[in-house]
């Protein structure tokens, strides 16, 4: 059984200290204190949070690590009698990730000791009046953010990142902190890509062993081929960013059509007919920001994929709580971002919001959708027999014309 220890406690302690320092910065900015980046407040709050996180990383809150002396023999007998159970794959991946992180930190500390020795094995070349080469420099946060923003804008011709406020741009960040953040992002990305490759490999292995019982992610395929790919290529193909309504009118027609299929009410048929008139009423629609919206949707899709993977290794109740909180924040943030980006044009905003709704229905995990969609509406859609959908709809329309229309006209 994999047990936590120093390999997890040391990185967690460092991350806890950085998180505490950032929390102190956020609190002082919300309170309007000057300066917001107080070193004393960052050290105090960072030290407290770092100590708690270090103890948690060591396993201080894990009952498996709390074996007292008076119960050691009894617990040892129980452990010997219990069957050996292999740890889940995510535990193995997490344990090795913490070990790689720990040894990376240790190697960096050893190199730092040699670098900062007064007479260490290095060459010092300092121009007069330019300070000490062993000092840690600082850089304004805007000096890091702005080049990244300009690079993305040049590469995609889109404003993917908003402009940073002057107050945030002026905050000074240590190069040491940036290096730690870079290492943390590297380790987290390695863990996520390792989990991605492991999940994909396991999926293909299961498909080879039992092809008939291996499901196809048809919702993701529909999102990629029908929603994401067309909407991401529109800004590249159409230089004016104005698209004829006739090309995107299916997005406006799908909601009333699906509701008409599910509920068979005349109101949805009327809205469907109004949607058919949109190409005449609104000839063109601006889609200036649709690619930016789709990049944000893809970000939520990656988050949904991570929770789909975690669902197989977490307790169901814990997964529902964590997924409910994190995904809800992501969904609300996505809608706020979409409306804020496209509010200058009503039809672009309407089209973007509908595209976001369709995308979320395709990429969010099914258990999460069941938590946010009313049970009655979900049951209606779940009861639809998709293989016989067209004949059923044709029969319903024929019955409506044969009996409903004469009754509406006052004929018996």
Image (cartoon, rainbow, N blue to C red):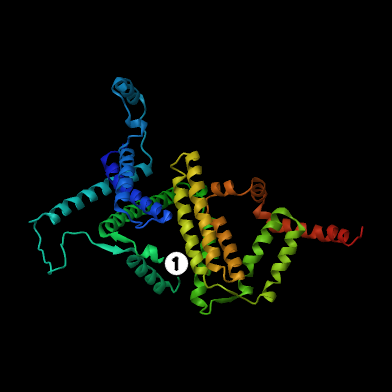
Give the image location of residue 397, x and y in percent. Answer: 77, 60
> In the drawing, does residue 96 fall left or right of residue 313?
left
Q: Residue at x 35, y 31 (%)?
A: 64
Which residue, given by chain and number where applicable, does mark 1 sit on?
162
Expressed as whole percent of the image width and height from the top left, the position of residue 410 reads 91, 60
* Visible residue check, residue 207: no
Taking the image as shown, residue 307 lies to the left or right of residue 185, namely: right
Residue in view at x 51 percent, y 79 percent:
239
| Residue shown at the point (70%, 59%) measured from the top left | 390
Q: Residue furthest right?
A: 412
- Location of the N terminus (image quadrant): top left
Residue sitting farthest toward the left: 119
Front residue of 321/26: it is 26
Instruction: Residue 398: tell me if it is visible.
Output: yes
For this orientation, the residue located farthest to the bottom is 240
**Residue 193 % position (x, y):** 37, 54
Q: Secondary structure at mark 1?
A: loop
Q: Reply above or below: 11 against 289.
A: above
Question: Is 55 or 174 nearer to us in this picture?
Answer: 174
* 56 to 329, vertically: above or below: above
Q: Quadrant of the C terminus?
A: bottom right
Label 1: few (<14), some (14–19) or many (≥20) C-alpha neighbours in 10 Å: few
- Residue 354 % position (x, y): 60, 63
């Amino acid at each position: 059984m994999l047990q936590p220890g120093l390999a997890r406690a040391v990185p967690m302690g460092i991350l806890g200290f950085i998180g505490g320092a950032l929390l102190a910065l956020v609190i002082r900015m919300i309170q309007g204190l000057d300066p917001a980046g107080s070193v004393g407040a960052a050290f105090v709050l960072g030290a407290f949070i770092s100590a708690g996180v270090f103890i948690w990383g060591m396993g201080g809150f894990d009952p498996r690590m709390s074996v007292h002396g008076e119960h050691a023999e009894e617990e040892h007998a129980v452990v010997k009698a219990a069957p050996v159970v292999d740890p889940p794959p995510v535990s193995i991946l997490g344990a090795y990730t913490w070990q790689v992180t720990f040894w990376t930190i240790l190697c960096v500390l050893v190199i730092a000791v040699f670098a900062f020795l007064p007479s260490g094995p290095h060459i010092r070349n300092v121009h007069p009046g330019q300070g000490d080469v062993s000092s840690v420099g600082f850089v304004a946060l805007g000096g890091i953010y702005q080049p990244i923003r300009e690079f993305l804008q040049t590469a995609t011709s889109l404003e993917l990142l908003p402009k940073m406020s002057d107050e945030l741009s002026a905050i000074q960040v240590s190069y040491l902190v940036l290096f730690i953040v870079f290492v943390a992002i590297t380790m987290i990305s390695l863990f996520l890509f390792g989990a991605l490759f492991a999940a994909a490999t396991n999926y293909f292995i299961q498909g080879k062993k039992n092809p008939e019982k291996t499901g196809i992610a048809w919702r993701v395929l529909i999102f990629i081929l029908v929603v994401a790919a067309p909407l991401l290529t529109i800004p590249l193909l159409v230089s004016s960013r104005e698209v004829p309504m006739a090309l995107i009118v299916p997005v406006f027609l799908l909601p009333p059509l699906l509701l008409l299929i599910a509920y068979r009410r005349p109101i949805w048929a009327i809205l469907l007919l109004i949607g058919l008139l949109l190409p005449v009423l609104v000839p063109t629609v601006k889609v200036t920001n649709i690619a930016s919206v789709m990049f944000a949707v893809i970000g939520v899709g990656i988050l949904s994929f991570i929770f789909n993977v975690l669902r197989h290794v977490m307790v169901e109740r814990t997964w529902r709580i964590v997924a409910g909180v994190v995904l809800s924040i992501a969904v609300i943030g996505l809608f706020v971002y979409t409306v804020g980006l496209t509010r200058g044009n009503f039809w672009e905003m309407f089209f973007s919001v509908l595209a976001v709704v369709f995308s979320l229905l395709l990429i969010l995990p099914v258990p999460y959708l069941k938590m946010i969609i009313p049970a009655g509406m979900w049951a209606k859609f779940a009861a639809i027999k998709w293989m016989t959908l067209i004949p059923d709809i044709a029969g319903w329309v024929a019955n409506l014309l044969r009996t409903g229309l004469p009754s509406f006209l006052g004929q018996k």
